[in-house]
Image: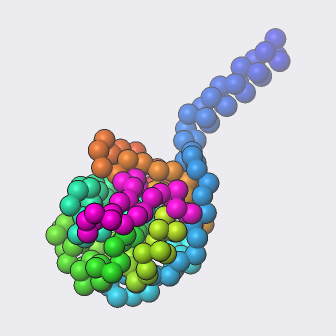
Amino acid sequence: MHLKKLLLTLLAVVTILAGCGGGFERQTDWEVESFSATTHRGETLALEDLQGTVWLSAFIFTNCATICPPMTANLKDIQEALEEQGVENYKIVAFSVDPEVDSPEVLTEYLSMYELADESKWELLTGYDQAFISQLAKNSFKALVQNDANSDQVIHGSSFYLVDQEGIVVKSYSGVSDVPVDEIAEDMKALSEE
């Protein structure tokens, strides 16, 4: 009888810990390749500069005629959810897939259209060539970035990628439609608390 009571107590404790522990469940394990780029502020940002910080990544460009404006608006919504939850140690890192057009000045002008809660959390990146961003997207994020031979547009994925403090992509989400804004903010908060 004593053993049965002990087992029931142990089971109850395990159940409570499993329910409360929450934590963050990693879905991918993709290492981000080393990079060095120029931010929209004209500063240099390298992968090492993001060490110790949880970041949400995307691929966009300012001349985009389709998905980039809603993706950027969705990133703004995610930032607002992060602010509401009191998350402070994070970055939103967007790689331009059209670096020849997207100078720091052009990226700054683009970002200014979104009335952000805290622009200092954003890093819009450029300063590399098209071959580099295509390879980085493919190797680190399992994403396609490719010039469209029939227009001035760039074909690219529409996902958001959650990157941990060690530079590992741990999860991806839809970035255009049915974007799980609250889930992303909760995941970023849980990951930043690990």
Indicate the position of residue 45 as horizontal and vertical percent values: 46, 82
At horizontal 56% and vertical 34% (from top left) the residue drawn is 19
At horizontal 35% and vertical 44% (from top left) the residue drawn is 180
Report if residue 164 is visible in the image: no
Span of residues in magenta: 138-160
Query: In the image, is 41 to the left or to the right of 45?
Result: left
* 178 or 115, nearer to the observer: 178
| Residue extending farthest front | 150
Indicate the position of residue 38 as horizontal and vertical percent values: 40, 84
Query: In the image, is 69 to the left or to the right of 189?
Result: left
Which quarter of the image is occupied by the N terminus? Answer: top right
| Residue 144 belongs to the span the image colors magenta | yes
* 169 or 150, nearer to the observer: 150
Query: In the image, is 130 to the left or to the right of 115?
Result: right
Report if residue 66 is visible in the image: yes
Name above or below for residue 110 compared with residue 36. above
| Residue 34 belongs to the span the image colors magenta | no
**Rendering quarter of residue 126:** bottom left
Indicate the position of residue 40 as horizontal and vertical percent values: 32, 81
* 85 or 163, nearer to the observer: 163
Which quarter of the image is occupied by the C terminus? Answer: bottom right
| Residue extending farthest top | 1
Count of all numbered marks drawn on residues in the image: 0
**Rendering quarter of residue 123:** bottom left
Name above or below for residue 182 compared with residue 68. above
At horizontal 75% and vertical 17% (from top left) the residue drawn is 5
**Rendering quarter of residue 177:** top left
Query: In the image, is 62 to the left or to the right of 168?
Result: left
